[in-house]
Image (cartoon, helix red, strand yellow):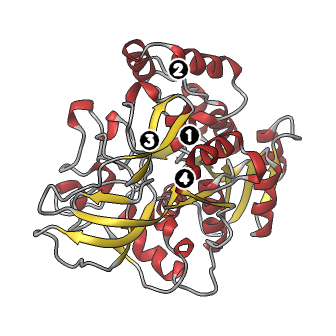
Amino acid sequence: MKAVTWHGKRDVRVEEVPDPAIKEANDAIIRVTSTGICGSDLHLYEVLGPFMAEGDILGHEPMGVVEEVGAGVDGLKRGDRVVIPFNIACGHCHMCGIELYAQCETTQVRERGMGAALFGYTKLYGQVPGGQAEYLRVPEAQFGPIRVPDGPPDERFLYLSDVLPTSWQAVEYAEIPDGGSVTVFGLGPIGQMCARIARHLGHRVIGVDGITTRLEMARRHGIEVVDASEVHDVPEEIRQRTSGRGTDSVIDAVGMEAHGSPAAKLAQTLTGLLPDAMAAPLMSNAGVDRLAALNQAIDSVRRGGVISIIGVYGGMTDPMPMLRMFDKGITLRMGQAHVKRWIPMLMPLVTDDADPLGVMDLTTHRMPLEQAPQAYEMFQKKADGAVKVMLQP
């Protein structure tokens, strides 16, 4: 089969690799019909190379059709149309029992001290072959796959794999009071959906980004925006719009790709040039994240407010302004999305022909799998108005 494979910094290729096969009784094989490129895939493309191996298959946002199921898989059959959550959970361990599926004790990558395994995402998360491929082996298929109806286009359902549950959790974790306000930093795919979900739930939403295409997309969905390329002091702008207080909550949908911290950007770049044996411990322990967005979030939230972090951070010793956070009484919530926990809330919205979350207005580029290298480069450079790229095997 053809698959998107990693070969180094900014070097992804489409290659012929062996077809996946059933290995365990609770496996399934799906034929992938659509698969997304996620903003966190760009971390692999840029700075997380020390945790990759040449030839690793990328991708964690797939959907498709079931081709084969193992003997231990009930409730799933050949021909079913399914979306595959990005994290791999068993559904029956203690953590799954309390709906913390991203911490599944069956698939935890204990040798790395990490949570549940993820598709296509580094040695840190199990080095499981990903979904940017023609076929995908799905472990724990007795629980993971989400069945969706036949008929509507893939875009109606594809984002149940990651974007929608990640965004829903970010909004839940933000604990926005009834009729309250939230600032969303970063209007990439996750930020777009965070903003739309929060507005759908009746909150005032202010979206912050510096890219015209993203700002225009947010405006189409009724989101109030701040253009960070034109506003010198974004937190001050937020306070001016909220009676001097700041918003009740803030969602950081940027993470370590934030602009505005040249020194940390240089540290990331230099780390990426080191041999893997040196770079991996440095990245794990020396904290080279760009914290510009998080620091702005701390300054933008009102006293006693909540910051929900859904953008990916990767460092272990990042400096935090603890005095300011303590003085303001800020609550922080964060973590990988517990995908299946949020599907009951999301499924009625994606099956509604009115498309209340605008899932049909998120993908900006649809490209064949063979063009994945060009797609990654375009997405990384935010060229040609790219907000979300979908690959079709």
For the residues bearing labels 2 and 1, Cβ distance under 8 angstroms: no
Nearer to us: label 3 or label 1: 3
Task: Identify the disc placed on residue 5.
Answer: 3
Taking depth in this image into account, of 243 and 99 the one nearest to the observer is 99
In the rendered structure, find residue 226 and report the number of the disc placed on it: none
Q: Residue at x 55, y 78 (%)?
A: 153
Q: Where residue 118 sits in the image (x, y, percent)?
A: 34, 48
At 27% from the left and 64% from the top, the residue drawn is 29
Residue 248 in sight:
yes
Residue drawn at (16%, 63%), measured in percent from left and top?
Answer: 26
Most extreme residue toward the right is: 230
Looking at the image, do the residues carrying marks 2 and 3 touch, with CB atoms under 8 Å apart?
no
Left or right of residue 43, residue 80 in this image: left
Q: Position of residue 324 (x, y in %)?
A: 61, 30
Judging by the rendered image, the residue that carries numbered circle 2 is 272
Identify the residue position indicated by label 4 in the image: 370
Which tag, 2 or 1, sits closer to the chain's start? 1
For the residue marked with disc 3, what is the amino acid? Answer: Thr
Q: Quadrant of the N terminus?
A: bottom left
Which residue in the structure is indicated by mark 1? 42
Other-residue count near label 2 (Cα within 10 Å), few / some / many at <14 / 14–19 / ≥20: many
Seen from the viewer's position, the closer of residues 336 and 4 is 4
Q: Mark 4 and mark 3 in contact (Cβ < 8 Å)?
A: no
Left or right, residue 228 beside residue 106: right
Q: Residues within 10 Å of mark 1 (few under 14, many from 20)?
A: some
Which amino acid type is marked by label 1?
A: Leu
Decide if residue 274 is on the left or right side of residue 142: right
- Depth check, mark 2 against mark 3: the one in front is 3
Secondary structure, mark 2, is: helix
Assess disc 4: are there few (<14), some (14-19) or many (≥20) residues with their C-alpha within 10 Å of its C-alpha.
Answer: some
Residue 361 percent location from the top left of the image: 68, 69
